[in-house]
Amino acid sequence: MTQALSLEKTPLSPSRLSRQSTNTKKVNEKAAAIRKSFQRPKFYMTGFGWCLAACAGAANVIAFKNWGLYASHVTGSTSNIAFSLEGYHQGEFTNQTLREACSLVFSFLVGAYACGLLIDKNQVHFNGKAFYGLALILESALLIAAAFIPGRLVPACFVATACGLQNAMCTSHFGAIVRTTHVTGTMTDIGSTMGRISMIYLRKACRCTPLNAIERAEIGVDARKLAVLGGLWTFYLIGGLIGIYVENIIPGPKALLLPASVTGSAGLFYLACRQLLKDYIKKMEKDRFAADLKEAQDALANMNGRLHDLEAGGDDKLVGDLDTEMGHMIEALHEVEVDLENVFERQVSKGSRANGAASAGPAVSGGA
């Protein structure tokens, strides 16, 4: 018994300590790669997506109450095309249903195409050359036109075009697919993400073992995704409820003026305050970069102290503490890396624009 206790207190051999350190480094690197797949959400981007989801929910229910057509349900419209073609085969062809379905699908496509012309990337960014203001104003104009144009199919197509324009405005958010005009994919992602988190906890509960660094990273990433996706579904529902009650107060398509006023005001605000907004975001990113850098420095200092303690007399507890410190350090360095990548991308973008302007100058003068 005494011999066993003495063996437990025996310090780790250098070779065993080296292997353990190598394994810990690989685990922490893999955990950092998992965290990198989903960056920390920025509150203004998240709020922007939630606001758009609420506007889409309101516009969709107003369109259905007035014209019996869902403007943003491209899946349903595509299914209606299939039903119409099957009816043609059975001798029960309904030209009106086919025309409505095709028009709605095409209108949604036109809106997404217009967004591709105005916005150069599929991820929300306020520091580039994307024309968010014009896109939002165009969406507002489409909704206003739908509120006053008589008929049934044409105004519904205008709403569908506005939905396509908005949906393409924010298709990717920090590694998670984001759609703001329908929630089928959102609920799919919510369910699958919750399932992954539950399976990690169930597996650990059955084995009676604690979570390792990789599993903690996976849970952290999925939890951040759930916060974004859950907010999208909630605000889409809230927007639908607001649209229903507004349509009861303002009967008819004129209720579309509510989501139109929100998107139009956002577009005008962006055009008027774009430079102020860019400066504010730049300052906020600098502050975050400074905080991440200080966190990384603190983690390195703590790890250095742990190494000195380990050299003085190593034990298993210090190895475990060192493992934790290494995880914090790698995570902090990852945040600094992301900030540096963002700064580098902006510098490259500015440099390419400057080179393009410089190369265009001699060509113009030579032609003259």
Image: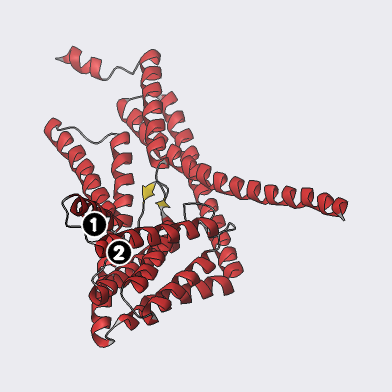
In the image, residue 132 lies at what x, y percent? 52, 64
In the image, residue 320 lies at what x, y percent? 32, 31
Quadrant of the rendered image containing residue 139: bottom left
The answer to whether residue 264 is above or below residue 115 is: below
Q: Is residue 47 left or right of residue 5?
A: right
* Residue at x-position 36% and y-position 68%: 157
* Residue at x-position 34% and y-position 83%: 254
Quadrant of the rendered image containing residue 30: top left
User: Can residue 43 be seen here?
Assistant: no
Marker disc for residue 80 = 1
Colour pattern:
secondary structure
Quadrant of the rendered image containing residue 34: top left
Mark 1 secondary-structure assignment: helix
For the residues labelled 1 and 2, say whether their Cβ atoms are less than 8 Å apart.
Answer: yes
Q: What's the amino acid at mark 1?
A: Asn
Residue at which label 2 appears: 100
